[in-house]
Amino acid sequence: MHNQDKWKWKKFLSKNVLEYDGTVYSIIDRKKVFVHGYWDLFIPFFYLFQNPNVLMIGLGGGTVLYEARKIFKNEIKIETVEINEKCVEMASKFIDLKNEKIIIGDGYDYVIKKSNSYDIIILDAYQERMIPEKFISEDFFLGSYNALKNDGLLLINYALNAYGLLKIGALKNYADEYFDLYSIGPTIIENNMIIVCSKNLEIDDIRKKFSTLKLPFFLKRRILKIKKF
């Protein structure tokens, strides 16, 4: 479990950086929307749906929620499941959470009880730099498949650290049973990749839609590099 005393917000130029024991969990830039990190890559997928229903497993310091509300206001329904109350406390320093649906609990248990509920599920859950093993299981991918609507997407922040490299084969095997798999990243300065698990959306359709979006150049360039995983 996380030691609650190791969570700290640090100031770096215009950015606020949430660290746990030296590992960055979130960045929020109150002068801009995007932070030039993997969190930004989730946002373009929201444009693939009209008023999407989104489930986020893992709040961290709230980067994705902050960005989504800045861009889409309250047009998007977002549910967030976070197992660690300290994360909610830390996120509340920069985000008004009183009108957000925040569930304190286990995202694995939450998602496998749902059916045809979401357009997008975002998995960004880490414990001591590792995705909990339950999220690298066939039951999780089956549960996510059932929880998604017909054209739904499961988006996974996957860190290619030693543990991630060890487990990526198992994750791919389980996910491939239910989804078409695509990926964005990593880069030479960031070892996180976004694994895109799609029920029905083809990569060419996703790329075509991305090409029409008005986004910062750095972000559009990254998302158009989506490829088969």
Image (cartoon, grey):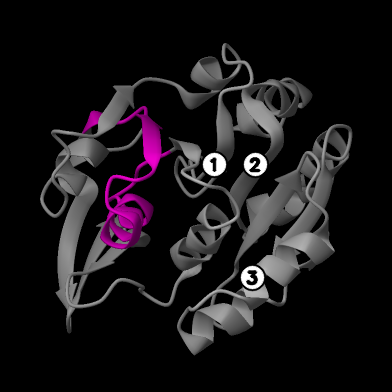
Circle 1: is it few (<14), some (14-19), or many (20+) Cα within 10 Å? many
Residue position for label 2: 154
Q: Secondary structure at mark 3?
A: helix
- The x and y percentages for residue 220 are 57, 80
Circle 3: is it few (<14), some (14-19), or many (20+) Cα within 10 Å? many
Q: Residue furthest top?
A: 113
Above or below — where is 25 with respect to 145? Answer: below
Near-viewer residue (118 or 227): 118
Indicate which disc, 3 or 2, sits on the residue closer to the N terminus.
2
- Residue at image x 82%, y 65%? 204
Indicate which disc, 1 or 2, sits on the residue closer to the N terminus.
1
Q: Which mark is residue 123?
A: 1
Amino acid at circle 1: Leu
Of the 4 image quadrants, the one containing the C terminus is bottom right
Q: Residue furthest front?
A: 50
The count of marks equals 3
- Residue at image x 30%, y 31%? 84
Residue position for label 3: 210
Indicate which disc, 3 or 1, sits on the residue closer to the N terminus.
1
From which residue to which does the magenta span run? 58-85
Q: Which mark is residue 1?
A: none
Amino acid at circle 2: Leu
Q: Quadrant of residue 213?
A: bottom right
- Please name which of the two marks, 3 or 2, marks the residue nearer to the observer: 3
